Amino acid sequence: MSSASGEIQQTEDSGPDGPERRSVTALAEALMPNQPSLELIALLAALVGDALVLLFIDDPWMRLLLGLLLLAVIVWSSARIGVLDIITRAPVEPVYKRRFVRLRGQVQQLLDEIRRLNWMAVDVERGFRNRESATQEMDIIETRLKELIAQIRSTAGQLSSEVDTELDSEQKDSAAT
Protein backbone atom coordinates (compact mmCIF):
# COMPACT_ATOMS: atom_id res chain seq x y z
CA MET A 1 0.00 0.00 0.00
CA SER A 2 1.34 3.43 -0.83
CA SER A 3 0.38 6.74 0.72
CA ALA A 4 -0.44 10.00 -1.00
CA SER A 5 3.15 11.10 -0.77
CA GLY A 6 4.49 7.78 -1.93
CA GLU A 7 6.78 7.43 1.05
CA ILE A 8 5.07 4.56 2.83
CA GLN A 9 4.94 1.06 1.40
CA GLN A 10 3.65 -1.88 3.36
CA THR A 11 5.74 -5.00 3.50
CA GLU A 12 4.77 -8.31 5.03
CA ASP A 13 7.58 -8.26 7.57
CA SER A 14 6.92 -4.74 9.01
CA GLY A 15 5.61 -5.07 12.55
CA PRO A 16 3.52 -2.66 14.67
CA ASP A 17 6.58 -0.59 15.58
CA GLY A 18 8.36 -1.09 12.30
CA PRO A 19 9.49 1.57 9.84
CA GLU A 20 5.98 1.98 8.41
CA ARG A 21 4.49 3.01 11.76
CA ARG A 22 7.27 5.50 12.45
CA SER A 23 6.99 7.13 9.04
CA VAL A 24 3.18 7.49 9.36
CA THR A 25 3.64 9.25 12.68
CA ALA A 26 6.31 11.52 11.26
CA LEU A 27 4.12 12.34 8.26
CA ALA A 28 1.12 13.11 10.50
CA GLU A 29 3.22 15.38 12.70
CA ALA A 30 4.56 17.20 9.65
CA LEU A 31 1.10 17.76 8.16
CA MET A 32 -0.71 18.75 11.40
CA PRO A 33 0.52 21.70 13.40
CA ASN A 34 0.80 21.17 17.12
CA GLN A 35 -2.30 21.57 19.28
CA PRO A 36 -1.52 24.90 20.98
CA SER A 37 -0.99 26.64 17.66
CA LEU A 38 -4.43 25.51 16.44
CA GLU A 39 -6.01 26.80 19.63
CA LEU A 40 -4.11 30.04 19.31
CA ILE A 41 -5.39 30.46 15.78
CA ALA A 42 -8.94 29.73 17.01
CA LEU A 43 -8.54 32.28 19.79
CA LEU A 44 -7.24 34.99 17.48
CA ALA A 45 -9.91 34.27 14.85
CA ALA A 46 -12.66 34.41 17.48
CA LEU A 47 -11.33 37.68 18.89
CA VAL A 48 -11.16 39.25 15.44
CA GLY A 49 -14.61 37.87 14.62
CA ASP A 50 -16.04 39.27 17.85
CA ALA A 51 -14.57 42.69 17.08
CA LEU A 52 -16.05 42.58 13.59
CA VAL A 53 -19.45 41.61 15.00
CA LEU A 54 -19.35 44.56 17.38
CA LEU A 55 -18.32 46.95 14.61
CA PHE A 56 -20.51 45.89 11.70
CA ILE A 57 -23.64 44.17 13.01
CA ASP A 58 -26.38 46.66 13.89
CA ASP A 59 -29.16 44.29 15.00
CA PRO A 60 -28.82 43.90 18.80
CA TRP A 61 -30.17 40.33 18.90
CA MET A 62 -27.84 39.16 16.15
CA ARG A 63 -24.97 40.92 17.89
CA LEU A 64 -25.83 39.15 21.15
CA LEU A 65 -26.16 35.74 19.50
CA LEU A 66 -22.92 35.94 17.51
CA GLY A 67 -21.06 37.53 20.40
CA LEU A 68 -22.06 34.73 22.78
CA LEU A 69 -21.15 32.05 20.24
CA LEU A 70 -17.73 33.61 19.70
CA LEU A 71 -17.33 34.12 23.44
CA ALA A 72 -17.66 30.38 23.94
CA VAL A 73 -14.84 29.79 21.46
CA ILE A 74 -12.71 32.47 23.13
CA VAL A 75 -13.17 30.98 26.60
CA TRP A 76 -12.60 27.43 25.38
CA SER A 77 -9.43 28.20 23.42
CA SER A 78 -7.93 30.44 26.10
CA ALA A 79 -8.57 27.75 28.72
CA ARG A 80 -6.94 25.12 26.49
CA ILE A 81 -3.93 27.31 25.78
CA GLY A 82 -3.54 28.12 29.45
CA VAL A 83 -3.78 31.90 29.24
CA LEU A 84 -4.47 32.08 32.97
CA ASP A 85 -1.29 30.12 33.68
CA ILE A 86 0.70 32.42 31.42
CA ILE A 87 -0.67 35.49 33.19
CA THR A 88 -0.07 34.12 36.69
CA ARG A 89 3.50 33.12 35.80
CA ALA A 90 4.32 36.64 34.60
CA PRO A 91 7.21 38.19 36.49
CA VAL A 92 6.09 40.20 39.48
CA GLU A 93 7.62 43.52 40.31
CA PRO A 94 10.04 43.18 43.23
CA VAL A 95 8.70 44.47 46.52
CA TYR A 96 10.56 47.54 47.65
CA LYS A 97 10.98 47.70 51.40
CA ARG A 98 11.07 51.16 52.81
CA ARG A 99 14.14 51.86 54.86
CA PHE A 100 13.08 55.04 56.67
CA VAL A 101 9.52 54.28 57.80
CA ARG A 102 9.58 56.47 60.91
CA LEU A 103 10.88 59.45 58.96
CA ARG A 104 8.23 58.92 56.32
CA GLY A 105 5.50 58.86 58.95
CA GLN A 106 6.74 62.08 60.50
CA VAL A 107 6.95 63.82 57.14
CA GLN A 108 3.39 62.68 56.45
CA GLN A 109 2.28 64.22 59.75
CA LEU A 110 4.09 67.42 58.82
CA LEU A 111 2.28 67.57 55.48
CA ASP A 112 -1.06 66.93 57.19
CA GLU A 113 -0.46 69.81 59.57
CA ILE A 114 0.53 72.10 56.68
CA ARG A 115 -2.69 71.18 54.86
CA ARG A 116 -4.65 71.88 58.03
CA LEU A 117 -2.96 75.27 58.39
CA ASN A 118 -3.73 76.12 54.78
CA TRP A 119 -7.40 75.19 55.05
CA MET A 120 -7.66 77.15 58.29
CA ALA A 121 -6.43 80.26 56.44
CA VAL A 122 -8.80 79.57 53.53
CA ASP A 123 -11.75 79.20 55.93
CA VAL A 124 -10.91 82.54 57.58
CA GLU A 125 -10.63 84.24 54.20
CA ARG A 126 -14.00 82.87 53.08
CA GLY A 127 -15.66 83.81 56.36
CA PHE A 128 -16.37 80.29 57.61
CA ARG A 129 -14.30 80.78 60.80
CA ASN A 130 -13.83 83.52 63.31
CA ARG A 131 -10.47 85.23 62.76
CA GLU A 132 -9.49 85.19 66.47
CA SER A 133 -10.22 81.49 67.06
CA ALA A 134 -8.58 80.61 63.73
CA THR A 135 -5.47 82.61 64.68
CA GLN A 136 -5.23 80.69 67.97
CA GLU A 137 -5.65 77.41 66.11
CA MET A 138 -2.99 78.46 63.56
CA ASP A 139 -0.58 79.24 66.42
CA ILE A 140 -1.16 75.75 67.83
CA ILE A 141 -0.51 74.27 64.37
CA GLU A 142 2.67 76.34 64.04
CA THR A 143 3.91 75.02 67.40
CA ARG A 144 3.12 71.47 66.30
CA LEU A 145 5.02 72.05 63.03
CA LYS A 146 8.10 73.16 64.96
CA GLU A 147 7.88 70.05 67.15
CA LEU A 148 7.57 67.83 64.09
CA ILE A 149 10.60 69.46 62.46
CA ALA A 150 12.63 68.80 65.60
CA GLN A 151 11.49 65.16 65.59
CA ILE A 152 12.30 64.85 61.90
CA ARG A 153 15.78 66.21 62.53
CA SER A 154 16.43 63.59 65.23
CA THR A 155 14.91 60.74 63.16
CA ALA A 156 16.66 61.54 59.88
CA GLY A 157 19.09 58.84 58.80
CA GLN A 158 17.78 56.18 61.19
CA LEU A 159 16.96 52.91 59.51
CA SER A 160 13.61 51.44 60.42
CA SER A 161 13.22 48.12 62.18
CA GLU A 162 11.07 45.22 60.94
CA VAL A 163 8.27 46.27 63.32
CA ASP A 164 8.14 49.75 61.75
CA THR A 165 8.07 48.24 58.27
CA GLU A 166 5.17 45.95 59.23
CA LEU A 167 3.31 48.87 60.78
CA ASP A 168 3.79 50.90 57.59
CA SER A 169 2.38 48.09 55.44
CA GLU A 170 -0.60 47.73 57.79
CA GLN A 171 -1.25 51.49 57.55
CA LYS A 172 -1.21 51.24 53.73
CA ASP A 173 -3.67 48.33 53.86
CA SER A 174 -6.02 50.22 56.17
CA ALA A 175 -5.76 53.37 54.05
CA ALA A 176 -6.60 51.40 50.90
CA THR A 177 -9.83 50.03 52.40
Image (cartoon, rainbow, N blue to C red):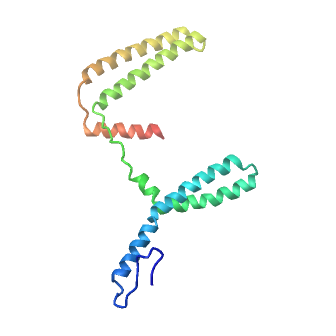
Tell me residue 93's x, y (percent): 36, 42
Vertical relation: 36 (above or below) 14: above
Tell me residue 176's x, y (percent): 46, 39
Vertical relation: 114 (above or below) 167: above
Left or right: residue 156 compared with residue 148: left
Quadrant showing the N terminus: bottom left
Which quadrant would residue 140 be assigned to in this image?
top left
Among all residues in the image, which is located at the extreme front?
A: 6
Left or right: residue 3 compared with residue 156: right
Viewer-proximal residue among 25 and 61: 25
Which quadrant would residue 74 be assigned to in this image?
bottom right
Tell me residue 148's x, y (percent): 34, 20
Q: Residue at x 60, y 12 (%)?
A: 126
Viewer-proximal residue among 29 and 43: 29
Among all residues in the image, which is located at the extreme bottom?
A: 12
Viewer-proximal residue among 1 and 120: 1
Number of callouts: 0
Viewer-proximal residue among 141 and 105: 105
Vertical relation: 148 (above or below) 84: above
Q: Residue at x 34, y 38 (%)?
A: 167
Q: Residue at x 44, y 65 (%)?
A: 34
Left or right: residue 153 compared with residue 130: left
Tell me residue 18's x, y (percent): 33, 83
